[in-house]
Image (cartoon, helix red, strand yellow):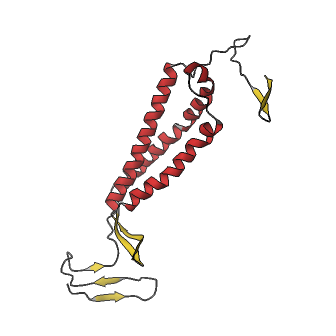
Amino acid sequence: MILKIVLNFLTPVLCTQIYQNCSCVLGGLAAIGVCDYGCSHMYGYVISGGLRLLVTTLGSIPKLIILMRGRGCEKMCGGPVESGWEKGFGGPVEGWLLAPIVFGSLIDNTCLIWDIKCHARGRCLLYDNDMFRLKFQGYAGLFLACSLAFQLIAYVYARCTRCLDTDAKGEDGAPTVEMTLVVNGNATVDA
């Protein structure tokens, strides 16, 4: 392979190197950098990403309602009483802790060329873009589908055991609400 630099700008503006007479490149010309493939699937990607966000967002309020209404189901369904950590904070923390580990491993597996400094692996210099796209979007879709499946199973279970039904009625036929005021860990007043 014979290389010859045609243009070399030393300023950051218009900095380009073009090589001629390359025997392994179609047309004999090459430039430094990654080839521009274009994006023929951009509209489909944006639409599918928007639908994914819509489905994820639409599931957050029903999930919250199931968590709040399910609080009284311990007696009926025989389940343990969950603490505030599990209901409000534990799930998101567990998800946010695991996601960077899982997706970081997926991203690292798509690296083609690693930077080696002092005999240790450094940052990735070149990713396999097709594999990166497939793994990243595929696993995100898989996790979303699993999440929706578990939410559907929980909803069907709650409907079959009638955990979400509110049968308590007041004298006027309106649903009643029971509230307990807790001060320093002791229940003081029932309303």
**Residue 36 sits in quarter:** bottom left
Residue 28 picture location, percent across and down: 21, 80
Relative vertical location of residue 163 with respect to residue 92 in this rendering, above or below: above
**Residue 110 sits in quarter:** bottom left
Quadrant where the N terminus sits is bottom left
Quadrant where the C terminus sits is top right
| Residue at the spot 42% in from the left edge and 39% down from the top edge | 146
| Residue at the spot 55% in from the left edge and 38% down from the top edge | 60
Query: Can residue 27 be seen here?
Result: yes
Along the line of sight, which residue is nearer the eye, 94 or 165?
94
Residue 42 picture location, percent across and down: 38, 55
Residue 163 picture location, percent across and down: 56, 21
Q: Is residue 179 left or right of residue 7?
A: right
Along the line of sight, which residue is nearer the eye, 138 or 47?
138
Query: Can residue 47 be seen here?
Result: no
Q: Residue extending furthest left?
A: 23
Question: In this figure, what is the number of numbered marks?
Answer: 0
| Residue at the spot 41% in from the left edge and 83% down from the top edge | 15
Q: Residue extending furthest top?
A: 171
**Residue 24 sits in quarter:** bottom left
Q: Is residue 32 left or right of residue 172?
A: left
Residue 52 picture location, percent across and down: 45, 44
Along the line of sight, which residue is nearer the eye, 31 or 85?
85
| Residue at the spot 32% in from the left edge and 59% down from the top edge | 130
